[in-house]
Image (tube, rainbow, N blue to C red):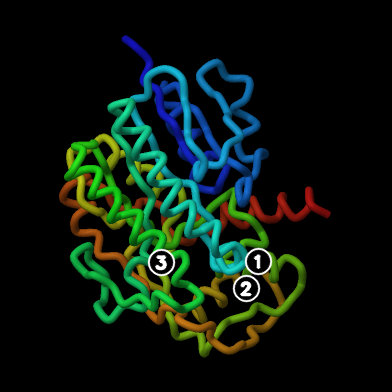
Amino acid sequence: METKRILIAGGAGFLGSHLCDRFVKEGYHVIAMDNLLTGNIKNIEHLFPLPNFEYYHHDVTKFVHVPGKLDYILNFASPASPIDYLKMPIQTLKVGALGTHNLLGLAKDKKARILVASTSEVYGDPTVHPQPEEYWGNVNPVGPRGVYDEAKRFLESITMAYHNFHGVDTRIVRIFNTYGPRMRLNDGRALPAFMSQALNGQDLTVFGDGSQTRSFCYVDDLIEGIYRLLLSDYHLPVNIGNPQEITLQQFAEEIIALTGSKQKIVYHPLPKDDPKQRQPDITKARSILGWEPKVSRQDGLRITYEYFKTALLSNS
């Protein structure tokens, strides 16, 4: 049987590298593409000796050429944490717009199925809770987070346009907060921030009063959901995330208990447009994909803590 070929844009990033692992394991020929703006080559170095893995150093906002046939394309190229997109607002907008356009053009040319990575951020600071796919969102287009939120909203729009106008076989995943090994220690999101602060003997910084909620999904569960969505027949957006909601105050307390840290929690002003609630409605994922998260937060955090301990040691 002929080996399926898949291009994973953003393949050296946190999620992209886990997707590379999964598709290599499933017997695909995997081509990872990344310009390493926020990705890390160390995330995929272990795959370099394999005959069914290739790496292209390339920026998808420029014309994308891949020789030979392609069966699937995954678009995971984008800065994904507030610290990154506030530092790189133009690149974030460009990869959401030009990068997605280039990859959709490649999918059209190769007659490949393409799955694009959207985000719960398309819901903005939601007025509906939990958030179902039918909710249109509450986004400030000119606020500091607008560069990411609107880039992803455009990504969804152009993907549907290519589906409806050109007949391209498309999938859209809306990813909620995900954590696990290979997250960057300095990525600015709650979990790496809390863990690196605890490990470095610093107090844990909570923004606002800590009552805002998040729903944390372990990376292996998320990858399984994406895998199932890619191979499904469903082309409208699907939420993939863990519906178990927790306040950031409770989350910081869990990290302190896990790490045995003696640190306390300190409070800083809430950043502009920071969402107050975040919880996926995963009814569609359950019914269409037969998917729901399996890894408990307790188990996932323990594995992630071990990873961060090792990462901190190797960086010191």
Q: Amino acid at mark 1?
A: Thr
Are the residues at dot 1 and dot 2 in contact (C-beta closer than 8 Å)? yes
- Which residue occupies the foreground of this view, 49 or 109? 109
Q: Amino acid at mark 3?
A: Asp
Residue 128 in picture, x, y percent from top left: 24, 78
**Up-down relation of residue 137 to residue 20 (above or below):** below
For the C terminus, the quadrant is bottom right
Instruction: Specify which label sits upstream in the sequence, 1 or 3.
Output: 3
- Name the residue at the top extreme: 1
Residue 235 in picture, x, y percent from top left: 20, 45
Q: Which mark is residue 256?
A: 2
Residue identified by numbered label 1: 259
Residue 160 in picture, x, y percent from top left: 23, 49
- Which residue occupies the foreground of this view, 302 or 149? 149
Report how far apart the C-alphas of labels 1 and 3 lie in the structure: 33 Å
**Up-down relation of residue 9 to residue 243 (above or below):** above
Give SS at disc 1.
helix
Residue identified by numbered label 3: 149
Residue 287 in picture, x, y percent from top left: 16, 50
